[in-house]
Image: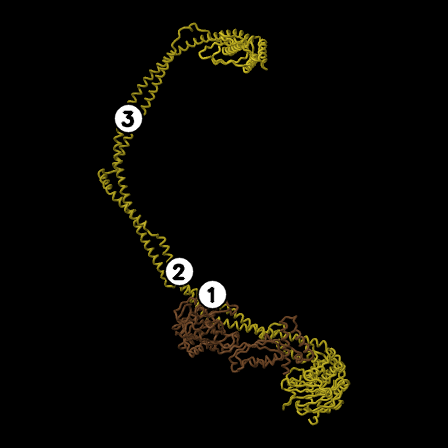
Chain colours: A brown, B yellow
Amino acid sequence: MTRLRFLHCSDLHLGKRFGQLDEDTRAALQLARQASLARLAEIAVAEQAGHVLIAGDLFDTETPSSRVIRQALAAMGGADGVAWWIIPGNHDSGAAEPLWAEMARHKPDNVHLLMTAEPVAMAPGAVLLPAPCLHRFAGHDRTAWMDTAATADGQLRIGLAHGAVLDFDSDQNGADTIASNRAASARLDYLALGDWHGRFTLDARSQYPGTPERDRFKHPGRGSCLLVELSQPGAPPAVKEIPVGQFDWQDLALELSPTQDITAELMRVLPQDRSTWGETLVRLRARGWVRADQRITLMQQVQDHAPAFRHLDLDTSGLRVEHRAEDLDQIATTGALRAAAEALLLDSQDVAQSQDSRDVAAAALNRLYAFVRKDAE
Amino acid sequence: MRLTSIRLQNVRRFTDPVEINGIAPGLNLLSAPNEQGKSTIFDALHALFFKDAKSWDKDVRALAPHAGGDPEIEVTLSHRDVDYRVAKHFTKSAGKGSVRVWQGGTLLHQADAAEAWLRDLITPPKDDGPAAMLWVRQGLTDFSDAKETLGARRDLMSSLSGEIGAVTGGQQMESLRREIRAELDRLVTKQGRARANGPLAEAETRLAELTERRDTLAAQVRELRDQLDQRQALRREEAELQDPDEQRARQQRLDEAEAALTTAERHREKCEQATRGLDLARVRLDQAIGRIETLTARLADHARAKDAVQTTSTAQEHAVTTAQTATQELQLAEDAARAAQDRVTAAGKAVADALQAENARLSAGRRRELTAQLAEYDKLQTAMVADRRLAAQGPDAQCLTRLEQQAQAVALARHARAASAATLSVRYHAGADPVLTLDGTVLSDGAEVALTDTATLDVPGLAALTVQPARTGDSDALPQAESALAEALHAAGFDTLDAARAAHLTRSEAASRLKEAEATQRALAPDGREALVAKLDALPAAPADAEGTEADRSGLEAEQAEAQQALTQAQATVTKARHTQASAQEAAQLARARAEAALTELERTAQVLGDNGTARATLAELEADRPRLTEDVHSAQAELEGLLASAPDLDQARAAAQRARSVQATAQARLQDIARDLAVLDSRIETHASHAVEEELAEVQDLLAVQEKAHAAVTFEVATLQRLDQALEAAQDGAQAQYLGPLMGELAPLLRRLWPEAELQVDADSVLPSQLARGATEESLTQLSGGTQEQLALLVRLAFARLLAQSGQGIPIILDDALVYTDDARIEALFDALTLQASDLQILVFSCRQKSFRNLGGTALAIRPVDGG
């Protein structure tokens, strides 16, 4: 009986720089990304998985720096007893010959670069059917050949491919889409897919592990890899998700209303375990209506908590401020200040004006309120 | 509204409850040394009326005692003759403060409703003038820090600013606008452009830098991708060129082409060699043939020359003989010709004599002929007279025709009668003789006769039968015709038609003879008888012997002709002989010349030929060798043709070899080019890769997105600040226009109470009092003495109070340490002003100057502990 255990991961995007974040965070994320290979190696050893399948986009670009390449090879070479099986993805396609030439030149023996679509003996009784991205855009389903790929009877058939199965993004080229029933049509025991940065299970045999180190709020949480065990040809695979990522990406919605306790609501939404904040990146999308003082409270609270997180970004584009009479009283009950506040309030609610003008008037009113409040504090 | 009592607990130093009772409607004085809590009472009152009970801001916090505790402030007041009690309790527990309003012993309002009641109490009806802003503390509106505020609070000058500022936003407004302008100034210039080195400029610069960097990197990435694509294409091409199978095939094609070319070239050399061999054989053969022909020709020439000598010599002899014979024959012919000439001369004379005689004879004959013609002419003349007479008799042709027509009519009538008459047919019996006669005519067997007239048939021996034909309608026609004929004949003078016909014949014949005679006459004498006679007369008279013997002229003429012919013949013979003789002479000369020429030619040919024997031997040798040479040519020709037939196409072989070499060379050159291009590309790619341009581009794109947001935020900040400043300015301008004028009107009489002709001037920008004009002197408020400043401030406050009082909603005025610097002389004037204003205002004066204020008058107040508190 053939039994095979391996790790399935994809989309490491080594070399990614995260320009949208501050420099410290950028450096930390890059280091974590680079370290994910070592972490995968540890997991493979710990789980007694002799193979790691990387389903494309090991690198973020087609011309990563030599340092990135060599460090990656070093990390893989350091994993004793683990064979790495790598296909190029669309980000680091086979068209990037210098990259793959350098990889081939310096790779340790346990690293296998799969640059052609042909069966490869992966282990006794197991054949790997790779579908490398030899160009950024193939214009066809690269896995189609697997249907007719002949293998000896009793062999495990494992597909390794990079690309969308569904139209994940609107800009996906439909012609490249991998047939969603490929595992069945090609009689695959498992189809290890890459490209989607989040975890996605198409069916029991066709899975995306997501990137082991998350890189955007679109795919929240921590990155992971999949431990796959195939007991025998035709038997369903046992798939287990194992966390890998160091950083936790959280896209949090903060629904607010004037009646809420802003501080309490904020604390309810933020991760409860404060010990994790230092490795958490948060995008906090505030929505709804608040009073002027609530808004100030929110800003102050976020400002207070932000340093505790690896990254905390407050998006208030969906948040509107409701100015009430008391708010205006706090600015001034009478006089010119009061008149100015009322004029701004009227402008901010005047539908005859453009949204930009109204937004500016509302911001000016918030500002006036904040000035007065700051002085009063 | 006026205050009647104040009670405090847990307010700063007053942790235990204290109270001020008996506050009067007019002027009140709380005179106490410093640190006795006067300002605390002032701040507590302000908090009561202006701070929300739930507030715990710095003003409220400042009220709490150091030892802790929640400030409690309570006042009693009279408003429109109704007494109320108001209690406000601040606490630091968020939102837990309370406020209550009682009327008598009844709780009237609490919480928000109580706050609203308080706001209504101190805020006059809308649009009710400057009093709306009156109830403010001096200095409190200054937005400087707390420490300064505390200092300023006791500064009546700042109070003055505060009072006016209450209308226009005051110091708070000023401070706000200063801050806004400072922030704006940091961001943009007055023209609204980004301030150099400011945040907006930096954001713009950074954005531009990033955009430029992004564009540069994007271009580099595009270039890099192009290079990668180029590299891939080159590698593919290189792989194809370096493919062993391809290389082998290329080399094999080249080797084959070279081998084919070598073979073709060698074959071409063989062909050329064979051609040269053929040419040589042909030359040898041609030379032999040439020599044979030359020798043969020379021998032939020599033989011909010999023959010619022989022939010409014989011909010469024969020609000489012939010439001699011809000369002899010429002499003979000339003799014969002379004899013939003599004979012709004699014959000619004889003929002439004969001819003369004959002419005479001919004239006589002519005379006779003419005489005969004349006689015949005359004879015809006589006959013609008779015939002319006969031609005038008998019927002419017209008359005879008429008679013939009438006779024909008779014949027609007769024929008609016969057609209608009975016929008689006769058939004799066999053996019977034809004996029947009709009118005397025997009728033969088978005869058939028409019986037109009465006829008699006679049967001999038997009877005579008379046959009478029957009468018909036309029975008269015949007699009529016959009668007409008879009449015509008679008229013509004839009895029968035949007589007429005969007479006409005679007439015609006579006419015919006459015509003939006339013709004959014209033939005999065409020109008439006279001319004929003249001709006869013209003839010469006949000689005597004319009728003599007639000589044989024809014989003579024949002899003459014969002699002439003989002469002609002789002459022809002479001519011929002479010609023959000349020809023979010429031929003899020619033959001589030919003989001489033949001898010359013989000598020449002998000389050319040389030794005849040798020449013949040589010719024999050549002839013997000729077949071999001919065979050589044939075999060389065959060899060449064979080679040419089997020759490969050299041009094609050359082209193929050249192409194969070119393919090989091109492939090698291309490989070198590719290697060089790859090296260049690798170097460039390596450069890009070492700079990690793609990663940097992704990073810069992210940075740019962040920077765009930051820039938008700064831009929005600028817009926000500008909008806020604009709103504040507009509100300030509005307030100034609405409230400042009335205030100045109220202030003026108060000012003049202290300084005649004094006028307070307001700064246009800050809308605050800036200068005090007294007569010709204008002084900045900050330059004024402390005493003057506080006096001025007090007057401004009183002016506000006046305005408020005029609105019908008086509010107490509290002067906290109002007159600190004013000297005693000036203070009296101010006390007067206060007393005057206090007639319809409640005024609370807090002062530490107990002695100086002793003369103020009014109700004296005191802070006392609450009993049992």
Task: Evaluate whether label 3 is on the same chain as label 2.
Answer: yes
Q: Nearer the viewer, mark 1 or mark 2?
A: 1
From this viewpoint, is residue B452 visible? yes
**What type is the residue that disc 2 sits on?**
Thr
Q: Which residue is mark 2?
A: B666
As helix, strand or loop, the secondary structure at mark 3 comes to: helix
> What residue is disc 1 on?
A140
Question: Which one is nearer the viewer's eye here, B348 or B776?
Answer: B348
Q: Quadrant of the N terminus of chain B?
A: bottom right
Q: Which residue is mark 3?
A: B319
Disc 2 chain ID: B
Q: Amino acid at mark 3?
A: Ala
What residue do we see at 33% from left, 52% from top? B648
Apparent side of residue A159 relative to residue B300 in the rendered image (left or right):
right
Q: Where does residue B389 sit, x and y in percent of width and height? A: 55, 7
Label 2 packing within 10 angstroms: few (<14), some (14-19), many (20+): few
Question: Pointer 1 indicates a residue of which chain?
Answer: A
Q: Secondary structure at mark 1?
A: loop
Q: Residue furthest top?
A: B544
